[in-house]
Image (tube, rainbow, N blue to C red):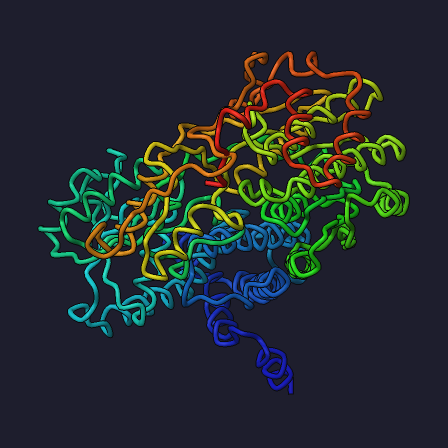
Amino acid sequence: MPFRKFYAFTKDLRNRHFVYIDLIFLLITPLIAYVLRFDGEFPQHSNALTGILYATLIFTAVKMLVFYLLGLYRRFWKTASIDELAILLFIGLNASIAQFIVFLAIRKIPGLHMESLPYSFSLLDSILSGFFVATTRFSVRLFERANQRLGKNDSHKIPTIVIGAGLGGTAIVEEMQRNNKLNMNPLAFLDDDPAKHNTRIRGVEVFGSISKLEEAVHHTNATRVIIAMPSASGKEIRSILHDCERIGIETLTLPGLDEMLNQNVRLDNIRKVQIEDLLRRDPVVIDADAVKTFLSGKTVLITGGGGSIGSELCRQILKARPSKIIILGHGENSVFEIEQELYFRLNKMNGGQPRPLILSRIVDIRNFNRVEHVFSESRPDAVYHAAAHKHVPLMEHNPAEAISNNVLGTLNLLKAAVKYEVKNFVLISTDKAVNPTSIMGASKRLAEMLVLSHAKNSGLNACAVRFGNVLGSRGSVINTFRKQLNYGGPITITHPDIKRFFMTIPEAVQLVLQASVLSSGGEIYVLDMGEPVKIVDLARDLIRLSGLREDLDVRIEFTGLRPGEKLYEELFLEEESYERTLHQKIFYAKNSSEIINPELELFVGELHSMALRGDSDSLKNLIKSFIPEYKWEEAPGISQQ
């Protein structure tokens, strides 16, 4: 009957066979421990045998109980790794401590005859039982690996070189070795760390540095290269890609760190090299603890929450666990999409902490009554203002919309922020606000001035963060080029010398959040955009990555600068000096608040009235009278490129 109960108890365990094996070993290790302790002598007296018998039963019961309570029998050992080894050591240590404490407590109890057993007896038993328990489990892993090697036929698999022998590359190789259906055979690593050269990782040789790519390809007859360096810069990726194209070998890559913020390294992540990979920069490192402290438990409102920047703000702010996220937007579809995504992410978040409340509000920020209602209802602690009309050529033909949305909308939000005592207000600005030649750029410059004015006159802790183009945003030049390629070309560029700054959306948002932590009110922060990129070079890279040839398969056409377009963008006004903040990729534009006209709000009212009348030339002249650097007469315009 006891055996039946024991069997019924164990049959629901994942590893019930290990229970029986452990039981056998644990019943014999005390005797082995005794023999080892006394130099091979078996117990001669009945009292000693009785003591060993009681010790065996008690030790076995204690260890089996600890193993069960700490989950040893609920683990999967066919894919055991260093994590399982660490857990096994932890459980074994706890079992040994529990056993020794029990041994001390019962050793001198009359009738058990255990007083003759030395303290080292318990220690030796723990070592032996730990060895047997670990051996049985990891032998399963070894048999599984041997089975995989015997069962695979590498001759039909794609011979592959993995560039990068770090965590990413190791994880990729492990998955190749574990899953024969992936049809890839890892033959060599390449890595620039000299300490790894001529070693083996997961049985795969580290052939040498990345510069030995061609030699490694000839040595292994590889036909595929996987770049497993998520933190590599665009310059490094471009160099590797150039070598692979010259050699004539297929090239795949893991995404950059920005794309993999919320993912584990898996072969599912591997893809062809994309244009964004060639524009990668050094990974952004922010003070994540400071950002979390800044946002945790707060009510945060994001305007334009369904847009490219606004939606990423929602994603990253969610990680800081605010009490509420208010998604404010004008387009119902985009707001609905990010709302549903945040709910999905919420379900994935670890429990044990309060879950943020997510609220969505469809609001036209030009309507002050609606804006005020949302502020009155939600009482936000922090506002990130990302809502704006951003398409430069489109706004040249719709100046009233640009002015009313980008300028009047910002003013409405600032008034509500002051009235309802918002603690922090952050405007998402643009490099096109510097010496603007477009209505969009001028409207964003006016929005910056409104932020500085309210920070100075009302004490609102408000700042603006200025940066250039972001990769992957709606209507970005790369997306436009891809659509043109899908239609067979041509790719249209306004001027062969046009240049633009680029950064990824996650990188920009990380720095925006860091800047908001730094702000004490009245600053314009400028993000380090790196070096500007020639748009024509971007187009040529995209053509090449698509497997096409310029002129033969697809043409590049130059169409001439459009209204409002500059050949290059700037990040600072002439009147502004700048200095680096505590963060190396965030600059502070000094003197920007000293050039604010005290009659700014009156001017905005007049500007809005004129915009509604639809006289574009008069509107531009009025803007120029207030913003002397606005150069719409001298330049034909600015592009979204």
Quadrant holding the N terminus: bottom right
Q: Quadrant of residue 142?
A: bottom left
Q: Position of residue 264 (x, y in %)?
A: 47, 54
Residue drawn 36% across and 62% down?
Answer: 487
Of residues 68 and 475, the one nearer the viewer is: 475
Q: Position of residue 45 (x, y in %)?
A: 50, 62
Residue drawn 50% across and 26% down?
Answer: 528
Q: Is residue 548 left or right of residue 519?
A: left
Residue drawn 47% across and 59% down?
Answer: 129
Q: Position of residue 228 (x, y in %)?
A: 33, 48
Q: Is residue 400 left or right of residue 323?
A: left
Of residues 48 and 486, the one nearer the viewer is: 486
Of residues 540 and 38, the one nearer the viewer is: 540
Residue 50 in view (yes/no): no
Quadrant holding the C terminus: top left
Q: Quadrant of residue 610?
A: top right
Residue drawn 31% across and 46% down?
Answer: 557
Residue 640 in view (yes/no): yes
Of residues 46 and 326, the one nearer the viewer is: 326
Q: Is residue 285 left or right of residue 542?
A: right
In this view, 466 is above or below 322 = above
